[in-house]
């Protein structure tokens, strides 16, 4: 049985806030609160997979230090363009 959308959004929001490094907690929790409810199911799938990635890699992608893998580029762009995220 698929996870109901409201439960999935709560789970992803919690995972966004409980990372490993404080910078990613801040960046991803802001994104979750600002945008998660507007993402399509396919975009939520990508975000869910993104949350499995290492925080060090995520920070480098969001801050523009290194290029993200192609499958995450659009999502990283959305995260990075939020005001005060980096």
Image (spheres, rainbow, N blue to C red):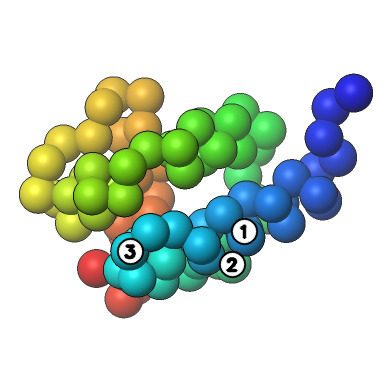
Q: Between residue 69 and residue 40, name the one nearer to us.
A: 69
Q: Mark 1 points at which residue?
A: 13
Quarter of the image that includes the N terminus: top right
Q: Is residue 70 shown above or below 12?
A: above
Of the two numbered discs 3 and 2 in the rendering, the one whose residue sits closer to the viewer? 3
Secondary element at image label 2: helix
> Picture coordinates of residue 75 (x, y %)?
41, 41
* 1 vs 3, front mark: 3
Residue under circle 3?
21
> How many numbered badges does the structure rendering display?
3
Q: What element carries label 1?
A: helix
Q: Is residue 26 above or below residue 5?
A: below
Residue 16 seen in the figure: yes
Give the residue at the far left of this rendering. Answer: 65
Residue 16 appears at what percent x and percent y? 52, 58
Q: Look at the numbered discs 1 and 3 and tell me whether their residues touch, using CB distance below 8 Å.
A: no
Name the residue tied to disc 2. 33
Quadrant in the picture for the C terminus: bottom left
Q: Position of residue 76 (x, y in %)?
A: 34, 45
Decide which of tag 2 and tag 1 comes sooner along the chain. Answer: 1
Q: Distance between the residues labelled 2 and 1?
A: 7 Å
Report if the CB atoms under discs 2 and 1 are less than 8 Å apart. Answer: yes
Whole-Å distance between the Cαs marked 3 and 2? Answer: 18 Å
Report helix, strand or loop for mark 3. loop
Nearest to N terminus: mark 1 or mark 3 = 1
Q: Which residue is drawn at 28% across and 24% down?
A: 70
- Between 50 and 84, which is closer to the camera in this rendering? 50
Q: Which of marks 3 and 2 is nearer the N terminus?
A: 3
Residue at x 69% of width, y 51% of height? 11
């Amino acid at each position: 049985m698929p996870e109901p959308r409201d439960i999935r959004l709560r789970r992803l929001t919690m995972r966004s806030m409980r990372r490993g490094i404080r910078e990613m907690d801040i960046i991803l929790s802001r994104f979750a609160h600002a945008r998660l409810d507007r993402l399509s199911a396919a975009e939520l799938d990508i975000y869910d997979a993104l949350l499995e990635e290492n925080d060090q890699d995520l920070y480098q992608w969001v801050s523009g230090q290194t290029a993200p893998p192609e499958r995450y580029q659009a999502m990283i762009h959305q995260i990075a363009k939020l005001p005060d995220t980096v």
